[in-house]
Amino acid sequence: DWKEMSKKLITFPCAGGSANNFNKIIKNLDCKIYSMEYSGHWTRYEERAYDSMEDCIESLYSEIEEIVTETDEIFLLGHSMGAIVAYEIAVRLLEHGFIVKTLFLLACMPPDEMDYQKITFENNDGIKKFLNEIRQIPLKVLDSEFFEEELLPSIRNDFSILSNYETMPKLSEKINARIICISGVHDPLVQRMSGWQRYTSNICSCVECEGAHFFLDDSLNISKINIVISRQLSVDLE
């Protein structure tokens, strides 16, 4: 049976993000990789966007169930909103008897510590201002027709899902999987991530990177995160 067992890494992008967001980070990793694309986003632009976090999790879980087996060792990687999605998917996988080894959670406070007010916007201008501050996206890009028509609807929908999100599982039901928190030291949205320890009965450790919310785009951080993931993939072989 051990011959059939394989390591699988499943990735979840940030709000408005694409399945390609992690391409550089996951390069040359010794495992099978599945990069999830959210419905209504990028390559799945034609599809209906999720109504809620619950809808998002149910939908993604049914896709993931098709690609994993009970002998697989599963690793989950998520950035920002994707970290919440990774955690919720881990809860489901463990409930259904799958083996979840490690969650790599990037740039995201634990759900009970998140400031949902920061991602609640009255209008599109509020979202654009936020994106300009958090990701330094130039205003001329944010005001472009392409952004308004192609990208803004899915970003707005994701923020809506997040701001209406409540932790579905109770904190008393800790998951048995390692959690590795990776954050940018200058991220205005994340003070500390150590609170994720309350969500697992296993090890929780924190890694800091130079940079803000999108520290994962920096080449030095890309190799740092790649090494962190590689070590976890090989940890049980030592």
Image: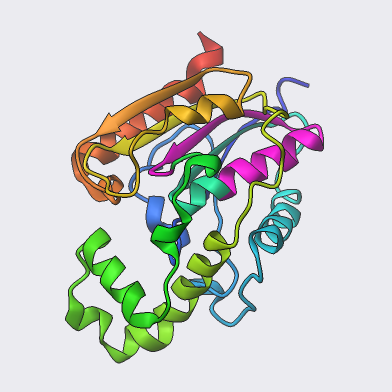
Asked if residue 58 shows in the view, the reply is yes
Residue 235: say if magenta: no
Specify the quadrant of the image occupied by residue 193.
Answer: top left
Q: Nearer the viewer, residue 228 or 67?
A: 228
Relative horizontal placement of residue 33, taking residue 123 as reference (left or right) = right
Specify the quadrant of the image occupied by residue 165.
Answer: bottom right
Q: Residue 36 location in percent, x, y?
A: 56, 56
Q: Quadrant of the N terminus?
A: top right
Extreme residue toward the right, this view? 96
Q: Nearer the viewer, residue 62 or 58?
A: 58
Relative horizontal placement of residue 21, taking residue 128 as reference (left or right) = right
Extreme residue toward the top, this view? 238
In this figure, which colouring scheme has been used for the structure? rainbow
Residue lying at 42% horizontally and 72% vertically, measured from the top left: 121
Count of labels shown? 0
Relative horizontal placement of residue 52, taking residue 23 as reference (left or right) = right
Asked if residue 12 shows in the view, the reply is no
Q: Residue 206 location in percent, x, y?
A: 38, 25
Q: Residue 186 location in percent, x, y?
A: 21, 42
Q: Residue 75 location in percent, x, y?
A: 57, 34
Residue lying at 23% horizontally and 68% vertically, measured from the top left: 132
Q: Nearer the viewer, residue 122 or 181?
A: 122
Residue lying at 26% horizontally and 59% vertically, measured from the top left: 134
Stretch in magenta: 85-108
Relative horizontal placement of residue 52, taking residue 29 as reference (left or right) = right
Instruction: Classify 70 as above or below 236.
Output: below
Residue lying at 47% horizontally and 46% vertically, measured from the top left: 114
Instruction: Classify 210 as above or below 160.
Output: above
